[in-house]
Amino acid sequence: MQQPTLTLDALANSADVLFLLMGAILVFAMHGGFAFLEVGTVRHKNQVNALVKIMVDFAISTVAYFLIGYSIAYGITFFVNAEALSGGAKGFDGQGLSLVKFFFLATFAAAVPAIVSGGIAERARFLPQCAATALIVGLAYPFFEGLVWNKNYGLQELFKLRFGEEFHDFAGSIVVHAVGGWIALAAIRQLGARSGRYKGTRSAAIPPSSIPWLAMGSWLLCIGWFGFNVMSAQTLKTATGLVALNSLMAMCGGILAALIAGDNDPGFVHNGALAGLVAVCAGSDVFHPIGAFLVGGIAGVIFVMMFQKVTNDWQIDDVLGVWPLHGLCGLWGGIACGIFGLKSLGGMGGVSFGAQLIGSLGGAAFGFCAGYIVYRSVDALFGFRMSQEDEAMGADLAIHKISATPEDDIRTGRL
């Protein structure tokens, strides 16, 4: 009588493997979105560098997470034989489900250096950035990830004891986006502004190289985000369409709010969609769709207003606006989960404003401190900033020895 149960368990595991694998593939595709968003925003002379950075960062992130980071976050290592990995040992689910979980969570981890990449574009040296990526994904990010998602070191128990509920971050408004955005702020401040970006108190605007590529990046990210959010359930049994609808409504709220606040600017519109999706991650499983729409709309306004304030008034040269987009909109999303997730505001409940406020601020502080330590160390050891000559030439030729359009360069005599 036991065989049918085993068969059903194997079937359930197989279904979850496919479900989570599709989520991992969707989030993996988001990294193409990060790449093209940066390609469209930076100048032509830095487009190749944007593409190479995102791909190399993904590879480094995956290896660092496989060797070190995943064990820090979840206490699981992969130094056993293939039979054990496929479900023959303690800690590894059948049908390789645990391995697909790693793939899925590795794509989340790799999003952190992809976020940073957009902020430090056009003036960071390549190999020091690679070293920083290994440190962030191998050590810093998984430590915080484990605190929240694996309940390491009893932090969630303390939240439960003090506030009545644990800190809730369903799909990573804080764990991924706020932490990544605040790490990026530390890196940006360590690098300083691009040459010619500011002249005294005046901001000298540097226009994006390609609105179509920027838009393509935004679309890829938006599509992949439904894997990022919906598949964060990690099993078919716990998946819910509420997450999908809330993600959709928050995205639309971000678009429309950025359209109005940004005076029809296409860069703001396409980033407004991302602002809404960043903010909804934490509470996408507990919001009412109207609440999700409002959360996304507020995030769209936050991005537009703070991008202008940061880059023009405060003269922080954040090329893609990753601190306002991920750092601040992610912070808002974590806090908003404790507001719009309440049953009194139509949410599912099970959240506490106090836990969300403290947990969100703590995640931002952790991200900035981790970024400060990593990028100060990398700068001291290797030198983080490109030389003025290389920056003027552009990272494509200075680092990769080829431009985005080599045939045209040869034909016109630029090479």
Image (cartoon, grey):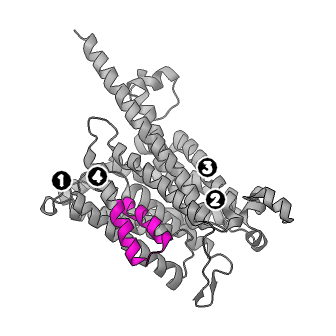
The amino acid type found where label 4 is placed reads Leu
Q: Which mark is residue 245?
A: 4
Q: Nearer the viewer, mark 4 or mark 1?
A: 4
| Dot 2: element | helix
Write the residue at 33% across / 55% down: 248
The span from disc 4 to disc 2 (Cα, nearest Å) is 32 Å
Work out whether residue 187 can be spotted. Answer: yes
Along the polypeptide, which appears first: circle 2 or circle 3?
A: 2
Q: Which mark is residue 406?
A: none
Q: Which mark is residue 348?
A: 1
User: 133 and 53: which one is in front?
Assistant: 53
The amino acid type found where label 2 is placed reads Ala
| Dot 3: element | helix
Work out whether residue 101 can be spotted. Answer: no
Along the polypeptide, which appears first: circle 1 or circle 2?
A: 2
**256 within the magenta span:** yes
The span from disc 1 to disc 3 (Cα, nearest Å) is 38 Å
Along the polypeptide, which appears first: circle 4 or circle 1?
A: 4
Along the polypeptide, which appears first: circle 1 or circle 3?
A: 3
Q: Quadrant of residue 235?
A: top left
Residue occupied by mark 2: 50
The span from disc 4 to disc 1 (Cα, nearest Å) is 14 Å
- How dense is the environment of label 1, judged by Cα within 10 Å: few (below 14), some, or many (20 and up)? some
Is 330 left or right of 118, judged from the image as shown? left
Q: Quadrant of residue 334?
A: bottom left
Is 326 left or right of 372, judged from the image as shown? left
Q: Which mark is residue 55?
A: 3
Along the polypeptide, which appears first: circle 3 or circle 4?
A: 3
Name the spot of residue 323 as percent of width and height, x first.
47, 69
